[in-house]
Amino acid sequence: MNTFKELFMKCVFLAAACTSVLAVALICIFLFANGIPAIKEIGIFDFILGRTWRPSNDVYGIFPMILGSIYVTAGAILLGVPIGLLTAVFMARFCPKLIYKPLKAATELLAGIPSIVYGFFGLVVLVPFVRENFDGNGSSIFTASVLLGIMILPTIIGVSESAIRTVPEQYYEGALALGATHERSIFWVVLPAAKSGVIAGVVLGIGRAIGETMAVMMVAGNQARMPAGLFKGVRTMTTNIVMEMGYAAGLHREALIATAVVLFVFILIINLSVSILNRRNLNGGS
Amino acid sequence: MEEARREINAINTVKVRDKVKAYFRNPVSFILFLLVMAAAILTFVVLMFLVGYILTKGIPHLTPSLFEFKYTTENVSLMPALINTIVMTIFSLLIAAPLGIFSAIFLVEYAKRGNKFVSLIRITAETLAGIPSIVYGLFGMLFFVTALHWGYSILAGAFTLAIMILPLIMRTTEEALKAVPDSFREGSFGLGAGKLRTVFVIVLPTAVPGILAGVILGIGRIVGETAALIYTAGTVADIPQNLMGSGRTLAVHMYALSSEGLYMNQAYATAVILLIIVVVINTLSGFIAKKIAAR
């Protein structure tokens, strides 16, 4: 009886462990089964490289959205990585003990704020600010990049800080002993040693930025045409899906699901590079 | 003794004047120092501004009428959304917590090291953790809403969110289980307990704070989620009669208010409530983390 119970529960645990495999399988099956036929019908090159998205005329090219996602993400990385990395250096190496705790709590708060609140903040503060101080109507690549740059800060800070902290103390002390200043030791010795951890953080940030939907939708303007400039509106892959899914039908609907397939492939590539980087970290090489 | 300590302290503390001299000799270091300070200050000023702005604009609009049980267009009450959020959280956790905890138990206590199947589970969990919420939303719409004919419902939303937070709970539970010393297990086996009894009576209770921390993180994600819910749980502004009814959570409510553009003040107020929930969640998890560290 007892051995039966042991075996039964072992099977229950095993079954539970299978759910994540099952979930990934289901997500793949449902996305690909609904998206691939549309890509076939439109033609893979017309779909991915097509420069016009006009569902009313059955023209589905998502190249503007792919570019939009890449531009906005690149902008966010350009703004978020230097600031996040320097803040991480501050948290790990410059911060007085007394203010460390409140600052850590603040970065955690930054990580916990829902994206819809960020989006709302962008809508009521950033968009009017950009409208008044720069070209255009405020909803633009630039605005979205700034907002996303803020949103990926906690990821970059958190991962970079722990990467900096895992660098052996002797590296820093050795550099000091050779006569380097505190700053030089950190930037020329400690930071290069933490490189792969920092890069993993950056890649995670890219993943967050590409996948972000609501916040970008509220500040990016969402015009489905080729991005025309830093202060012009843009539409990303995620916002394309969420904006039109409500009323789409037929091929239009399938084209949107196909957009998610492309997004999913992007994310898979990013996840793969993160896990490769992490594996290299564990092996201790750089 | 006392003197020696004072001497060590004197060596370790750098006088401000020496510091300034060092910077004078080494301007690059000074620039780096300024950059680090500027970045840190910028980060926290942005955060302060964001939170401060939302609070000052939102708190005056937290009127009692916002907490009435009925949503009408004259009074866009956030109470139904708040209740939906709580219901959604409970049901997502009811699904995700046992699954996540059980899978972690399997991975840590039962699976053999280097098993191919274990690495498959790890890879899929990592994949799940990285999928954007809009893709979850689409999948939920295709699978739960359409294929299973659940329609836009709290249930479809809860299942979608459960898959979303599954890797989070799995991960933290795994860490918590691994942190339980092996001597506990050996002691239990030594006293003649079976594997199952060891897991449930010895290992799990010891790991509770770690598991709880994961669950709280999960709550945070559920409360903040919007994109995955719009096309699974829908955006109906009332409390549904049962789990098969459609209802909006607070985050979706806020999205609806701000995209309509008519009720900006109420959107500010909703943002305040969301921020308060985030702060409470962070404080709770910090409190639990302190408890773990104290042991």
Image (spheres, coloured by chain):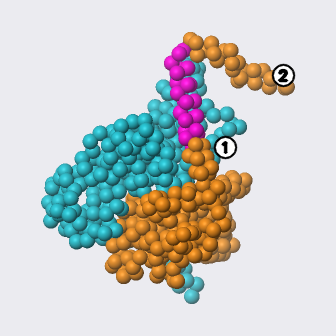
Report whether B220 appears left or right of A277. Answer: right
The spot of residue B143 in percent (x, y) is 35, 75
Q: Is residue B267 above or below residue A226?
A: below
Give the label, 2 or 1, closer to the camera. 1
Chain letter tied to orange: B
In terms of secondary structure, where does tag 2 sit?
Answer: helix
Q: Please name the predominant secondary structure of the magenta segment in the image.
A: helix
Residue at left offset 30%, top offset 52%: A223
Looking at the rendered structure, the kind of residue marked 2 is Glu
Q: Image point 37% across, 44% down: which residue? A: A137
* Picture quarter with the N terminus of chain A: bottom right
Q: Give the x, y percent position of residue B60.
A: 64, 55
Do we see residue B63 in this rendering? yes
Residue annotated with mark 2? B3
The answer to whether any part of residue B180 appears in the image is: no
Foreground of the two, B74 or A179: B74
The amino acid at mark 1 is Lys
Residue lying furthest bottom in this view?
A1
- What colour is chain A? cyan
Q: Is residue A72 left or right of residue B264?
A: left
Callout 1 environment at 10 Å: few (<14), some (14 to 19), or many (20+)? Answer: few
Residue B70, numbered circle: none
Give the residue at mark 1: A101
How far across and how far down the image is residue B140, in percent?
39, 71
